[in-house]
Amino acid sequence: MSLNGYDIGVIIPAYNEEVYIGHTIETLVSLPYIDRILVVDDGSEDNTAYVAASAGAYVLSLPQNRGKALAMKRGYEAMHTHVLVFLDADITEGACQIIKLIEPICERKAEAVIARFPMTTGQGGFGLVRALAAKGLYFLTGKTLTGVLSGQRAILRKAINDSFFEYKGFGIEFGMTADMLLQNIQIIEVDVNMKHRTTGRDYKGFLHRYRQFIDIFLVIIKKTREKAFSKRIATTQKEQD
């Protein structure tokens, strides 16, 4: 069933998510406007693929863990619906609210929609990663977005190109968002009441945020160099003219 003539596909990159992914998929399966659900199992060592298939999703299993960006890219290559919804595997509540991401695209009000989660108190880190992402995005594009790191986003498929996935680790959402803004893709943010697993303040939580910080920082360096190179090329061409 399409929505305003657009068919909808959901891509869920997953690694060792057997505890949460079944609930996420069961919610999505019940939604009449979702045409296809694809879980890209990124070399999981648990029963993620089995649980996902049992809950009603198609599963694409990668032979080894290669990271979220490649899993998203493989999903993009395999899914040919008009609208692609990228969704994290650990949504514990509110997965049905992806309609808020889809409708603006189907109503031709946006080419990409990013979910903006409510702020949580007493959990998570100290905002260093969010601050880096916000300042880095403004430095690269001159624009600001609240949900730059959100893994919950819908994109018109024809607005996507392969370069959006050329990032490593936790840099994928930041890099993809910067690319979309630099290519003048029309992005809006919408508030959702989704909930997902929160990274705590234990050792694993701090390690997770450290890796996130480094990966985003590397994207900023990469794109700064690309920006400087493009500027030199433009200056050279101008001098030759």
Image (cartoon, rainbow, N blue to C red):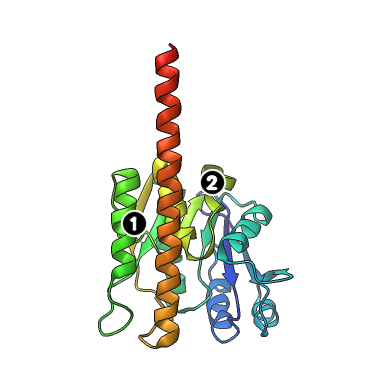
Is residue 238 in view? yes
Binning the other alpha carbons within 10 Å of mark 1 as few (below 14), some (14 to 19) or many (20 upward) gives: many
Q: Which mark is residue 155?
A: none
**Residue at position x 52%, y 65% in the image:** 169
Residue under the image location 39 percent in, 88 percent down: 202
* In the rendered image, the vertical position of residue 61 relative to residue 235, given as above or below: below
Report the residue marked by disc 2.
Answer: 160
Q: Which residue is mark 1?
A: 189
Looking at the figure, which quarter contains the N terminus? Answer: bottom right
Residue 19 vs residue 238, the one in the foreground: 238
> Percent from the top left, x then y, of residue 35?
61, 61
Counting from the top left corner in percent of width and height, residue 31 is at: 53, 69
Q: Amino acid at mark 1?
A: Glu
Residue 35 left/right relative to 103: right
Q: Examine the rendered structure and indicate whether residue 209 appears above or below residue 155.
A: below
Residue 194 placement (x, y as % from top left): 39, 74
Q: Which residue is painted at 60% across and 81% down in the image? A: 16
Element marked by disc 1: strand
Secondary structure type for disc 2: loop
Q: Earlier in the sequence, mark 2 or mark 1?
A: 2
Q: Quadrant of residue 15?
A: bottom right
Query: Which is more foreground, mark 2 or mark 1?
Result: 2
Which residue in the rendered view is the most extreme toward the top? 241
Asked which quadrant contains residue 18, the reply is: bottom right
Residue 116 locus on image (x, y percent): 34, 64
